[in-house]
Image: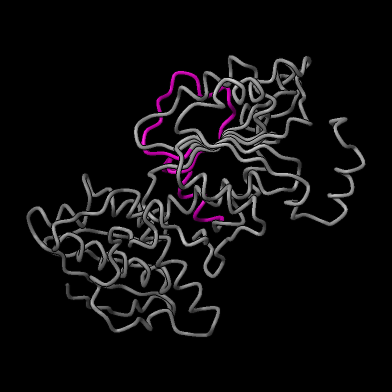
Amino acid sequence: MVVGPTVDERSGTGLEITVRIPSGAERVGVLGAGERNLKMIREALGVDVLSREGTVVVRGEREGVSAAQRVLQRLGAAARQHRPLSRREVLGCITDESSALETKAAVGEHPDQHDDHDASDAIHHEPSDEHAPGAWDGRLDVYVRGRPIRAKTTNQDLYIRAIRDHDLVFSIGPAGTGKTYLAVAAAVHLLKTDRAARLILVRPAVEAGEKLGFLPGDLEAKVNPYLRPLFDALHDMMEYSTIRRFMDSDVVEVVPLAFMRGRTLNNAVIILDEAQNTTRAQMKMFLTRMGHGSKMIVTGDTTQIDLPDPNDSGLIDAVRRLAKTPGVGFVALDRSDVVRHPLVQRVIDAYGEEGR
């Protein structure tokens, strides 16, 4: 693929490039159905993209154009190998290239200084054996560069292994033991290494009920406070722009439990956080959403049940019912796994089994 850049005289920071693209079926592999790939590049990188006969013209700020150029090169290389990239893989390419430019800018390199290698080296190949199921090396690869996440305790390591080896995992333990954080990290790892197509984070809004109407704002504003902890974990593993891009394209969803009814979720990692606050009926509804190729991770703290009757907890009921079910993993975390401030361990000891 030949790239011919020209400087846009209207702006010292502007740039225009022309990228030659293949014809026939390979052209569709680059542009996407209905030029879907060009639309994603345009919206994500803030550049003007125009397809012409045999070429694509990209105009805009130098950084965005440089990132778009590299994405188009990767699309072209994949198309020539008769392996057009999926929508999710195109989003991954855009994220990788924009992050790479941000890193170069941070160390003072010019954004147009690319490694001189064939673009086919940058294709999203099938994951290597290092990332195959059953062969995780203990690191969870997330989208924030240089930030692999590892277990800090023996039980946390068992937790990650359980997620690797089972399609349904229950993790129970007190606050600060990494239940939610490691679940999100494992899900992001599976998303980035092409082991999952979607990431769905779910939480019950127990205190909401009919009281939601008394909170200000629209429905999204009313439920966001209950979902905030999931967003906090996600922000540690993805740049804000990446999260927005993935949420706009439904690769990542953060939703209240009530919105899960009637859905079947295939090729996804679905996390149910604060599961101790689900009822038996809600837990059954959630667990039966699992589709082909999916994993579910259920986290909760049985000492912090907010239901009117703690005996109604769907988490406690599910653990009892599924304890001997093949294919279901259970991990118990305790005070020794707390990775927050050292005082958190002492607070847990002080309260003991009293709950909240």
Judge left or right: residue 218 versus residue 353.
Answer: left
Quarter residue 322 falls in: top right
Q: Using the image, determine if residue 111 lies above or below residue 83.
A: below
Task: Point out the stretch of residues depicted in magenta.
Answer: 240-269
x 45%, y 30%: residue: 326
Q: Nearer the viewer, residue 36 or 135?
A: 135
Residue 257 location in percent, x, y?
58, 26
- The quadrant of the picture occupied by the C terminus is top right
x 20%, y 64%: residue: 76
Query: Seen from this angle, which residue lies furthest left?
Result: 24
Q: Is residue 101 magenta?
A: no
Judge left or right: residue 27 versus residue 36.
Answer: left
Quarter residue 295 falls in: top left
Residue 310 location in percent, x, y?
76, 19
Q: Is residue 258 magenta?
A: yes
Residue 193 location in percent, x, y?
39, 56
